[in-house]
Amino acid sequence: MERLSQIVTEDRIRKYSTALIVKIIVILKIYGIIYRLSKYFFNNHREFMELLNITDILDFRTLSYRFLRIDWHCINSSIIDIINPYNDNAAVDSSIVKTCRDTTEEKEE
């Protein structure tokens, strides 16, 4: 969590910092929790709230809004640099790939 604080930069002062948003999202992704249930999850796991040094959790709409405005590619590359700064061959991709419904290949029967 401390390394995430070092990676994420702030563009302005907010009630919930970008570093805090990233930490919350990382915890939710690790446990497979959707944003809508984030308040319920953190209220039942007070140890994470203590780890993040917060007393209340932000609304899931704010979390979703802020998630869309974070430069995840920059954060991913910074994490890769911290893990192995001398490795030039690494890839991190979190984009969703939609498959085609219709293909041009003939189906084998």
Image: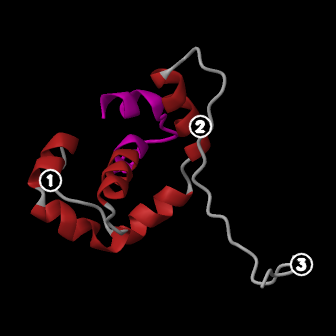
Q: Which amino acid does label 1 sit on?
A: Thr
SS assignment at label 1:
loop
- Residue drawn at x 68%, y 71% as measured from the top left: 98
Distance from Cα at disc 3 to Cα at disc 2: 36 Å
* Residue 25 % position (x, y): 38, 53
* Magenta-tinted stretch: 1-21
Rendered image quadrant of residue 77 = top right
**Front-lying residue, 103 or 38:** 103
Q: Is residue 95 above or below residue 2?
A: below
SS assignment at label 2:
helix
Label placed on residue 104 = 3
- Residue drawn at x 30%, y 51% as measured from the top left: 27
Does the magenta run of residues contain 69?
no
* Marked residue nearer the N-terminal end (3 or 2): 2
Q: What residue type is labelled 2?
A: Cys
Residue hosting label 1: 55
Are there few (<14), some (14-19), or many (20+) residues within 10 Å of tag 1? Answer: few
Foreground label between 3 and 2: 3
* Residue 78 % position (x, y): 53, 29
**Front-lying residue, 83 or 64:** 83
* Marked residue nearer the N-terminal end (1 or 2): 1
Residue hosting label 2: 74
* Marked residue nearer the N-terminal end (3 or 1): 1
